[in-house]
Amino acid sequence: MELKPEIEKQIKEQLVEKEQVWSKYACKSSDAIQFYHRKEDIRPAFFHDVDKIIHSRCYSRYIDKTQVFYLIENDHITHRVLHVQLVSKIARTIGRFLNLNEDLIEAISLGHDVGHTPFGHNGERIISDFCERKGEGIFEHNVQSFRLFHEIEKKGDGVNMCVQTLDGIICHNGELLVPRFDCDRTKTKEKLFSEYTESLKNKGVSAKMKPMTLEGCVMRISDIIAYIGRDIEDAIKLQLIDRKDIPREITKVLGDNNKEIINNLIIDLVNNSYGNDYISFSTEVFNALDELKKWNNKNIYSNPEKMAQDDKIKKMFDYMLETNLVFLNENNTKSNIIKWLDGEMSHSYIDKSSNVRIVADYVSGMTDDYLMNSYKELVLPKSFGINFSKKA
């Protein structure tokens, strides 16, 4: 079924008219660059990317991936799936105020964390150490997000998203806070792919990348805005910290709760970014946010109570990584990783990926529960039932 020609014409004119009021620094739909040609669609290019993302398999796995707190039996604690929704909402709010492309912002926001491992940044560090030990470069979740959409989804063919979307995804770094976020408008798709290839090999490469759009810059800072106060609220729920412990010199600038922190950061960001080809905070707010990040790191992320099970988690990861590498090297057809490759992935993916990188792709793609269940299946003995008979 197709739209009536006269209606399709009116819709296209409406979309063009809408973009005419945007900032001169906005990335318009007509600016979209394709990695590979795709069939023309009435949907704006970046709006189409949003659909590609939410219908991808890696997006569905957000549902059981850790944000900060793992092994917690509390449904009100933030998981990865909620975090990306919060990032999207905050980034689109900023984008609307600055007259930028909300479709592009939403696509980058929703896709930015699909490369995260089970057990959050802890799992990411363990998998990266594994890759380094085996001489296969490094592992970073933002780079893996690019890899998933470009080289792993659809059995290794990728989902053919716009260059600007993939660029914003790989350039996001929620750990990196700088006084001013600039974009690199000279970047080409060839340079982006070169950056991606290099970032698989060496640490620090992706942290130096600049997004090619202002929308990418907005999403980058929105990642921090989305988690900085929310993590505090989660930590308070879990009785890991107390609100009154947050230093007064921080709270008098940003507030002491998630609502105030988000509101104050967005307002200050818009006040200091409106009409500019960059994103920035005021000096006072930037310094307060920087100090709050350091305080969160010491009192939440590196809290000994939160890290109490980390040694066991590392042993589980190491066992799963090493064992699956053996399965792959020996072509153990009974193993789940071989079944995954045979049933889910193309020969082209297998041919262009080393066994170490395939294992990193496989384990990093697991949800928290699936990793633990897979580990139990390999390590814990199974019951024979009431007898050894094969009959029911």
Image (cartoon, rainbow, N blue to C red):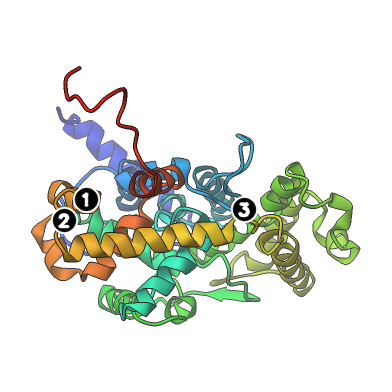
Q: Residue at x 76, y 75 (%)?
A: 283
* 169 versus 91 height, above or below: below
Left or right of 343 in this view: 138: right
- Name the amino acid, label 1: Ser
Q: Position of residue 32 (x, y in %)?
A: 30, 61
Q: Position of residue 125 (x, y in %)?
A: 48, 68
Q: Which mark is residue 138?
A: none
Q: How many other residues sit within 10 Å of disc 3, few (<14), some (14-19) or many (≥20)? A: many
Q: Which mark is residue 332?
A: 2
The N terminus lies in quadrant: top left
The C terminus lies in quadrant: top left
Q: Residue at x 21, y 50 (%)?
A: 335
* 138 versus 43 height, above or below: below
Q: Which residue is mark 3?
A: 226
Q: Residue at x 83, y 64 (%)?
A: 250
Q: Which residue is mark 1?
A: 335
Judge by depth and name the residue closer to the eye, 44 or 166: 166
Left or right of 300 in this view: 40: left
Q: Position of residue 23 (x, y in %)?
A: 50, 61
Left or right of 287 in this view: 356: left
Q: CA distance from mark 2 to mark 3?
A: 43 Å
- Name the amino acid, label 3: Ala
Left or right of 223 in this view: 149: left
Judge by depth and name the residue closer to the eye, 6 or 274: 274
Dot 1 or dot 3: first in sequence order is: 3
Please identify the quarter of the rendering in which residue 26 is found: bottom left
- Name the amino acid, label 2: Asn
Is the Cβ of the residue at disc 1 closer than 8 Å to that at disc 2? yes
